[in-house]
Image (cartoon, grey):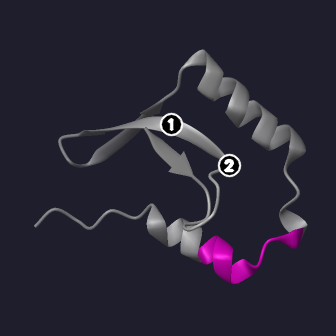
Amino acid sequence: MFGRGIPGQKPFFHVIEFWLENRLMVEVVSPQMAEEYVSCLKNADMSGIDPAAIRQMQQSYLRPAAG
């Protein structure tokens, strides 16, 4: 299970992550995880988040290319 959000802070929601042939990421969720995700979207206020923190969050999801 992986938390999605800004590294070092409480995750916004959680997912189960699978990589297929090290190239395609698939995320699945339980019903409880889906509720957490929907709640996050309904209550999201991104105006107070520092743009640098958003870039850091995006970078944390990049996976190095298989060599």
Q: Residue at x 66, y 83 (%)?
A: 52
Q: Residues within 10 Å of mark 2 (few under 14, many from 20)?
A: some
The x and y percentages for residue 38 are 76, 32
Can you name the residue that lies furthest to the top here? 31
Residue kind at label 1, given as amino acid type? Val
How far across and down, in percent of the image, does residue 1 sit? 43, 38
Answer left or right for 5 relative to 41. Answer: left
Taking 36 as reference, is 14 left or right?
left
The Cα atoms of the two marked residues, 2 and 1, are separated by: 10 Å
Residue 26: mark in rendering: none
| Res 15 label | 1
Asked whether 2 or 47 is in front, the reply is 2
Q: Quadrant of residue 43?
A: top right
Q: Is residue 49 magenta?
A: yes
The residue at 70%/32% (across/down) is 36
- Residue type at mark 2 is Phe
State which region is magenta.
48-55
Residue 9, image x and y in percent?
A: 63, 63
Viewport quadrant of the C terminus: bottom left
Say which element carries label 2: loop
Relative placement, left or right, of 61 versus 19 is: right
Pointers 2 and 1 in contact (CB under 8 A)? no
Query: Is 54 left, or right, of 60 in this rendering?
Result: right
Above or below for 60 versus 38: below
In terms of secondary structure, what is the magenta stretch mainly?
helix
Does the magenta segment cover residue 58?
no
Secondary structure beneath disc 1? strand
Depth check: 26 or 38 in front? 38
Residue drawn at (79%, 42%) of the image: 41
Q: Position of residue 27 (x, y in %)?
A: 45, 35
Q: Which mark is residue 12?
A: 2
